[in-house]
């Protein structure tokens, strides 16, 4: 039998990074955009070159990075957002593991240009080694904020790279779907997306205008006509949060049992040519999430009123941060709801009631 010995550190970093950026281009863009939100940006521009195959650049006007942090930005598990496991329950920022930039160094070429409000219009450009160590810094013109440029994604993982090359259009479409969700949910943030195809010039894909409401954001992203097909979603109910295990109650805390689901959904009325795009976006406290069971519940209730079309759904679930766990998948898009069964039950009942009471509703019985 061969001797058991540790994998060398460099290889461990490569292996783990491939997992953090497990969803390819989607993970890259999501991590960068979330960093911009975490930095309180009110303007975020995403620039794809060749649908992301050549590069992705995210430009924000957030707080910027102070010089004392340059050395640690891309070190694994170095973060400015979380210091101990106990803080995880109350995590409100998107990032908290300090893994994204470190992983990107291992998988791509990463360049960061940043300036704080005191430094602008003079900024600093930073480049990193594969290990995440700072390689160089130089003076560069910069507005307040941070620009992260990621080139040649997966250049160190040939199999992943060729897979990305083969599926780039599909990956790009998936990323746009996620960006639409961020653009929709964030009020007061100007969000714009551009792509520059290999032989063309930079073209806008969609943009929001820093609107005060999600309604206006949706109009910007999906077209103003979409709104005529939608009704406001506003459900409120109580559920019992039974969180078992260690650390269930935070000192001075306790879970708030109120749940509020706000957003927009297609009118349940059949026909009249008013069909919104078949898009379904779910959020938990403003964090875009994949919630298959919640989605199923919505669709099931909707079917009672409209069997022919599936609804446009934009639903943000507001609930106590103790009632779920975001630390279950590397991309943080899956969420563990501690009392899902109860939530689904209450959700279905109140959605049913909302549609039943809606004046436009024409109940449709399945036979
Ligand atoms: P995390 O987001 O989990 O902290 P990251 O690797 O994504 O880990 O980022 C590491 C650190 O770099 C962050 O904690 C933050 O301090 C800083 N940072 C990253 N992106 C930005 C940005 N766009 N603006 C300001 N600071 C940033
Ligand atoms: Mg992050």
Image (cartoon, helix red, strand yellow):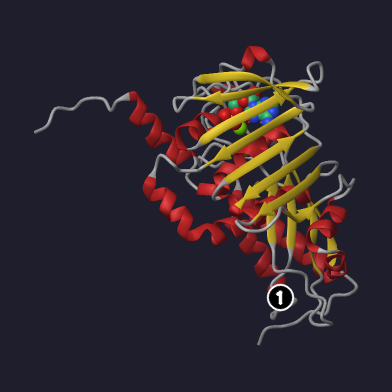
What's the residue at 55%, 56% (across, down)?
171
What is the quadrant of residue 270 in the picture? Answer: bottom right
Of residues 138 and 303, the one nearer the viewer is 138
Q: Is residue 286 visible?
A: no
Q: Position of residue 300 (x, y in %)?
A: 65, 69
Q: Answer whether residue 350 is visible to the viewer in this image.
A: yes
Q: Quadrant of the N terminus?
A: top left
Residue 152 to residue 214: above or below: above
Q: What residue did someone put label 1 on?
A: 304
Q: Residue furthest top?
A: 68
At x 63% / y 57%, what residue is drawn? 197
Label 1 Cα neighbours within 10 Å, binned few <14 / some 14-19 / many ≥20: some
Front one among 86 and 137 = 137
Question: Could you say which quadrant of the image residue 296 lies in?
Answer: bottom right
Label 1 SS: loop
What is the x, y in percent for residue 301?
70, 68
**212 sits left or right of 72 in the view:** right
Q: Where in the figure is residue 10, as x and y percent of width and height?
A: 36, 27
Q: Is residue 45 left or right of residue 19?
A: right
Along the horizontal axis of the image, is 3 left or right of 68? left
Mark 1 C-beta closer than 8 Å to ligand 2: no
The quadrant in which the C terminus is found is bottom right
Residue displayed at 84% across by 82% down: 272
- In this rendering, is residue 47 above or below 119? below
Where is residue 253? Give x, y as percent. 70, 25
Q: Which residue is rendered at x = 50% and y = 40% of the image?
A: 330
């Amino acid at each position: 039998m061969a001797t058991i010995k540790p994998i060398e550190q460099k290889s461990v970093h490569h292996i783990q990074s491939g997992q953090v950026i497990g969803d390819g281009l989607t993970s890259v863009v999501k991590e960068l955009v979330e960093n911009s939100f975490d930095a309180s940006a009110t303007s975020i521009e995403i620039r794809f070159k060749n649908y992301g195959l050549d590069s992705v650049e995210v430009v924000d006007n957030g707080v910027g990075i102070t010089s004392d942090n340059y050395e640690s930005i891309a070190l694994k598990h170095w973060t400015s957002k979380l210091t101990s496991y106990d803080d995880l329950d109350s995590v409100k920022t998107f990032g908290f593991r300090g893994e994204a930039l470190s992983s990107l160094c291992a998988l791509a070429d990463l360049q960061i240009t940043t300036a704080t409000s005191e430094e602008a219009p003079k900024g600093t450009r930073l480049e990193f080694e594969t290990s995440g160590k700072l390689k160089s810094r130089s003076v560069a013109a910069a507005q307040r904020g941070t620009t992260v440029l990621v080139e040649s994604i997966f250049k160190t993982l040939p199999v992943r790279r060729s897979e990305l090359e083969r599926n780039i259009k599909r990956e790009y479409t998936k990323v746009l779907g996620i960006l639409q969700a961020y653009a929709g949910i964030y009020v007061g943030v100007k969000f714009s997306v551009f792509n520059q195809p290999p032989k063309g010039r930079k073209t806008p894909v969609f943009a929001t205008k820093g609107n005060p409401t999600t309604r206006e954001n949706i109009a910007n992203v999906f077209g103003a006509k979409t709104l005529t097909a939608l009704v406001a979603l506003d459900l409120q109910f109580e559920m019992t949060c039974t969180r078992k295990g260690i650390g269930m109650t935070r000192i001075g805390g306790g879970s708030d049992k109120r749940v509020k689901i706000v957003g927009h959904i297609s009118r349940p009325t059949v026909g009249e040519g008013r069909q919104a795009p078949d898009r379904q976006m779910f959020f938990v406290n403003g964090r875009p999430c994949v919630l298959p069971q919640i989605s199923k519940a919505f669709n099931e209730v909707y079917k009672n009123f409209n069997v022919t079309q599936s609804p446009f759904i934009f639903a943000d679930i507001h609930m106590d941060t103790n009632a779920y766990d975001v630390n279950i998948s590397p991309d943080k898009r899956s969420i563990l709801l501690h009392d899902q069964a109860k939530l689904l039950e209450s959700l279905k009942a109140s959605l049913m009631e909302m549609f039943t009471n809606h004046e436009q509703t024409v109940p449709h019985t399945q036979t």
